[in-house]
Image (cartoon, rainbow, N blue to C red):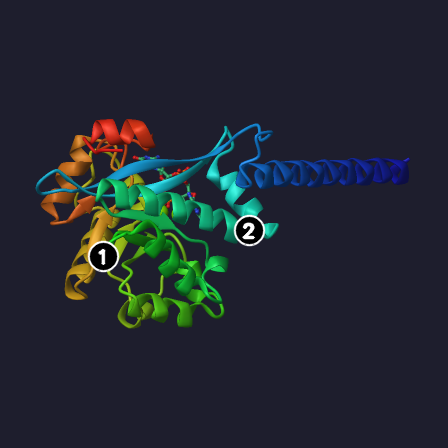
């Protein structure tokens, strides 16, 4: 009896694993088609652009490019692409598209890069993409995560990128295994304060709370290391006022502007396409 039940449970487990695997393979094939721009692809790839705004003047500073693919969230298909060896071609697609927009609009665009992209000839490939699209130096910004810094072999690529003058923004700062040591050694220009800080503060932000003290400490760390700070996830005016009061230079979030498709972003921000 018990044995039979155990067998059933195992069979169930195996069946759901099997299903997850098949779903992975199906999605991966569809993603490959989208990447090849197949006429048969159900869902094309697209970029959404979200403004990063200088808080003092309320002016557009640059856009972050966020990849879109049908209804699947990036948290689903980016890890899939990483697992299945598609992240380099996918990342290249994003870089080329972003480079064209940055060149056409004359506005810098930041692109998220996965740790596994920061290997081999990445810096040279990026240089080529920028040259082909005639993007000014600084016109493409890379957003990297703490995971990328810790990954084997990325240091050399980061140094090459620094030599090329590519601005590097440290994404989701404070949400991973933050080590303060690499802030001193690495060629990083800007810290992006992860959304978690604002979530933890509450809205309106609770002054003198532990979260408030941590945010103030990080902002002053940024100042003393001469790193610009971008606050992520600003959803209200009270959060915006709080961050301005702290002297945070830039912000991003639904309150300042949601991610939007290329043509709506161009219309909204008065850019020529
Ligand atoms: P991220 O780089 O931290 O991007 C910011 C995420 O926060 C985006 O989610 C954006 O839509 C969302 N967001 C912006 N403002 C607000 C706000 O006020 N409130 C809330 N709740 N969320 C806000 P999205 O587009 O779902 O992307 C998720 C993650 O996927 C990104 O996090 C990034 O790590 C990754 N990603 C997106 N596009 C790419 C890409 O082209 N390449 C790679 N490697 N990763 C990407
Ligand atoms: Mg990012
Ligand atoms: Mg982020
Ligand atoms: Mg992220």
Q: Helix, strand, or loop for circle 2?
A: helix
Answer yes or no: disc 2 within 8 Å of ligand 1: yes
Q: Is residue 128 above or below residue 210?
A: below
Residue appearing at x 33%, y 47% in the figure: 99
Report the disc number at residue 167. none
Quarter holding residue 63: top left
Q: CA distance from mark 1 to mark 2?
A: 31 Å
Place residue 17 in its image quadrant. top right
Residue 119 % position (x, y): 48, 65
Q: Nearer the viewer, residue 150 or 37?
A: 37
- N-term-proximal mark, 1 vs 2: 2
Residue at x 20% of width, y 40% of height: 206
Q: Pointer 2: residues within 10 angstroms few (<14), some, or many (20+)? A: some
Counting from the top left corner in percent of width and height, residue 265 is at 27, 31
Which residue position holds label 2?
82
Residue at image location 35% in from the left, 65% down from the top: 179
SS under mark 1: helix
On-image quarter of the N terminus: top right
Left or right relative to 42: residue 172: left
Q: On the image, which quarter does residue 42 sit in? A: top right
* Label of residue 218 in the image: 1
Q: Nearer the observer, disc 1 or disc 2?
A: 2
């Amino acid at each position: 009896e018990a044995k039979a039940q155990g067998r059933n449970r195992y069979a169930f487990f195996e069946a759901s694993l099997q299903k997850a695997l098949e779903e992975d393979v199906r999605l991966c094939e569809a993603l490959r088609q989208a990447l090849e721009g197949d006429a048969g692809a159900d869902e094309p790839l697209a970029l959404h652009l979200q403004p990063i705004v200088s808080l003092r003047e309320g002016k557009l500073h640059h856009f972050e490019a966020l990849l879109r693919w049908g209804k699947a969230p990036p948290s689903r298909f980016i890890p899939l692409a990483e697992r299945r060896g598609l992240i380099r071609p996918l990342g290249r697609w994003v870089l080329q598209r972003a480079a064209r927009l940055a060149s056409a609009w004359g506005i810098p665009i930041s692109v998220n890069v996965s740790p596994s992209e920061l290997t081999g000839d990445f810096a040279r490939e990026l240089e080529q993409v920028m040259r082909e699209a005639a993007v000014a130096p600084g016109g493409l910004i890379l957003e990297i995560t703490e995971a990328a810094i810790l990954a084997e072999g990325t240091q050399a690529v980061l140094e090459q990128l620094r030599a090329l003058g590519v601005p590097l923004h440290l994404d989701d700062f404070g949400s991973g295994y933050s080590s303060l040591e690499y802030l001193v050694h690495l060629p990083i220009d800007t810290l992006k304060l992860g959304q978690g800080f604002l979530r933890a503060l509450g809205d309106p932000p609770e002054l003198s709370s532990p979260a408030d003290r941590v945010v103030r400490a990080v902002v002053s760390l940024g100042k003393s290391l001469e790193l610009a700070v971008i606050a992520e996830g600003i959803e209200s005016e009270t959060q915006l006022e709080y961050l301005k009061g702290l002297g945070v230079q830039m912000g991003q979030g639904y309150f300042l502007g949601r991610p939007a498709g290329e043509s709506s972003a161009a219309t909204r921000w008065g850019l020529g396409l």
